[in-house]
Amino acid sequence: MATPNASADQLVGIMRDTIVSLVRRDGADLSARQLGVFLTCYLRDGAHTVRGLAADLNVSKPAITRALDRLGELDLARRKVDPLDRRSVLVQRTPKGAAFLRDLRSIMNEAATGSKKVAAPEKPASRRAANG
């Protein structure tokens, strides 16, 4: 039976392999904060607001706004004024965001099973250096 530390080490290894696969993919990378906001919106049910995300993640509303700006640029999430309370802004999921989550699950599954298959084509070395 694995010790608790071995399990934690395995989880950290899965996280590392997942992050490495994500940065090797063609396209933009997400920061830890952006990924945290994204995953909260996609994995937790209910309506998400800037205020609610800030409270949930224990970060400032401007930090959430900046993360949502980036997620919006990438079409992974979008903001919409709440029709019931025009002072509030709702965060909505997008088809591209749902596809990204499916890809992320696949990458993590490959990392967890120790698969050596490449999850996505690597960026050319010159692009990787510029992004990284």
Image (cartoon, rainbow, N blue to C red):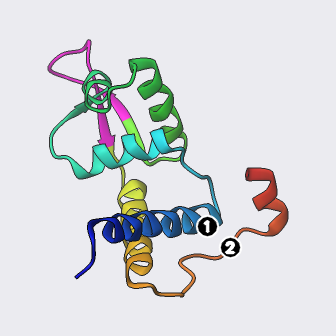
What residue would you read off at disc 2? 122
- Amino acid found under the numbered disc labelled 1: Arg
Decide if residue 45 is on the left or right side of residue 109: left
Residue 127 x, y percent position in the rendering: 79, 60
Q: Residue furthest bottom?
A: 116
Residue 84 versus residue 68 in the image, above or below: above
Q: Which residues are magenta?
A: 79-92
Pick whichever, 60 or 47, lies toward us.
60
Residue 129 x, y percent position in the rendering: 80, 57
The residue drawn where x is 26% and y is 18% is: 88
Q: Are marks 2 and 1 in contact (CB under 8 Å)?
A: yes
Q: Which quadrant, please, contains the N terminus?
A: bottom left
State the SS at label 1: loop
Which is more N-terminal, label 1 or label 2? 1
What residue would you read off at disc 1? 25
Residue 63 x, y percent position in the rendering: 46, 24
